[in-house]
Amino acid sequence: MIVYPDKLNIIFDKFKKFNIKAIFVGGFVRDFFLKINSKDIDIELYNAESFEQIVDILKEFANPNIIGKSFGVVKLKLDDLDIDFSLPRLDNKISKGHRGFEVMINSTLDFETAASRRDFTMNAIGFDPHTKKMLDPFNGVEDLKNKVLKIINPKTFVQDPLRVLRAMSFCARFELRCDKNLIFLCKNMLEQNMLSELSQSRVYEEFKKLFLKSKKPSIGLIFLKQIDALDFFKELKMDNESWANTLYSIDRFCTNKLEDDKTNLLIILALLCYELSDTDIKTFIYKLTNKRKLIRGIKSFHHVAKYLQNKSTKLLYKITKDIDIEKLTAFLNAIDMPKERMKLVPFIKPTMSGKDILKDEIKQSKDYSNILQTIYEQQLKAKIR
C-alpha cells in the first residue's frame, strides 16, 4: 500500500460525496516503488461532471490555479505539497512537435484506457486511496522490480519526440536498462530527425534532469550513443578514449556535487564539452540554450586546465580575475588533474589591473590584455618559486 499525506483524505472524502473517484498516478506512485520521497503529487479524478466542478470543490481547501485548464489540470498548493488534479484524457497527434496534440478530456474513461496515453509502464501505475489497491494494467511494478524501462504502446510512443530524451533521463536517474523495443523505436524516431521538432527549452530541461537528478549521468549518455542520437548532437562525437574519459569525469563529479544546482550544471557541461573545440562547444550549447554566459563559464574552466597542462592560453588573466576557487577545484578534481599540477592552480589574484597601468601614464592600448597576461604569468612564476 502506498503511503501518502493524511491531510489529503479530507479532500478525497469531499470528492466521494460527489461520486468522484480520486486515483494517485504518475511519478508519485512510481517514486514510492523506487523509495524516493516525493512531494509532487498527481491525482486523476474520475466521474466528475465538469472541470468547473473540480475547481469549485478545491476552493474549500486552497486557492486553485487553473493555468492547465486546456489539459484538464488544476494545480493546488497545500502547505508543503504541490498537487496536480487532472481529468482523464486521451491525446490525438495532429501536428509535429511535443505540443502537437489534440487533448480530449473524458472523465468517464476507465483507468486502463486513460493510462494508455502515458509513455512508460512505470508511469502508468495507479493507486486507489479508498480501496487501497494498486492499478497496474501494464505491469509497471514488475518492470520496476526488474529495473527495466519499457514503453506502453509503440504507436503512440513515437508520436512524441520528447520521449526519446525522457528515456535518456529516466534510465540514468533510476539506473534502468532499456527494453530492446524502446531502443528500436528511438532509433527509428532519430532516423526521421524527430528531435529537430523539439524546442530548445524542452531539450535543455531533459538534459538538466539527466545531469542534476542522476548519480550516473553516463547511463543516459551511453543510451544516446546506443540509439545513434549523437548524429543529432554530432559535436559530442569523439574517439573512444575521449568518450570514456568524459563519462568518467562526469560521474566522478556527480558523486560529490556542490550545493548549488546552477553551479553543478555549469561544471557538468564543462566536463561534457572538455574534449570539444571552442566552435563545437558553442554549437552544442546553443542546441540547449542561448545563454552566452554559460559558454564563457565553460571556456574559463578549459583555459585554466590547459594552463596547468602546460598548454598556451591567452585568457588566463581575464579568467583569474573573477574565478571561483571552489568551482574550479571541483572541475579539476573531476578531470583527474595530477596533484603536483594542482599546486600550480592560479588562485592568486592579479596584483596589477588596467587602472594601474593608466596611473603610470601609459597610453591606452589594444595590447593591455597581453601586457596584463605577461605580468600575471610572471607573478605566478615568482610565487611558485
Image (tube, rainbow, N blue to C red):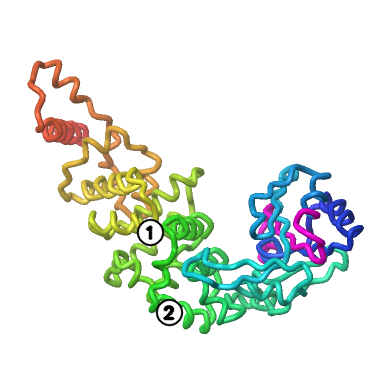
Query: At which x and y percent is residue 78?
Result: 75, 45
Query: At which x and y percent is residue 301?
Result: 30, 47
Determine whether 164 is above or below 205 in the image: below
Q: Which residue is the site of mark 2?
A: 187
Q: What range of the chain is rendered magenta? A: 31-53
Which quadrant would residue 157 be assigned to in this image? bottom right
Residue at x 39% of width, y 63% of height: 248
Which quadrant would residue 102 be assigned to in this image? bottom right
Q: Relative to residue 170, is residue 104 drawn left or right?
A: right
Q: Relative to residue 154, is residue 73 drawn left or right?
A: right
Please say whether residue 51 is one of the residues in the magenta stretch: yes
Q: Nearer the viewer, residue 68 or 212?
A: 68
Q: Amino acid at mark 2?
A: Lys
Query: At which x and y percent is residue 176?
Result: 55, 72
Residue at x 51% of width, y 60% of height: 215
Please say whether residue 36 is one of the residues in the magenta stretch: yes
Query: At which x and y percent is residue 279?
Result: 23, 56
Q: Nearer the viewer, residue 60 or 317?
A: 60
Q: Are the residues tagged 2 and 1 within 8 Å (C-beta)? A: no
Q: Amino acid at mark 1?
A: Ser
Q: Which residue is the site of mark 1?
A: 249
Q: Relative to residue 42, is residue 147 drawn left or right?
A: left
Residue at x 63% of width, y 78% of height: 146
Q: Relative to residue 7, is residue 336 drawn left or right?
A: left
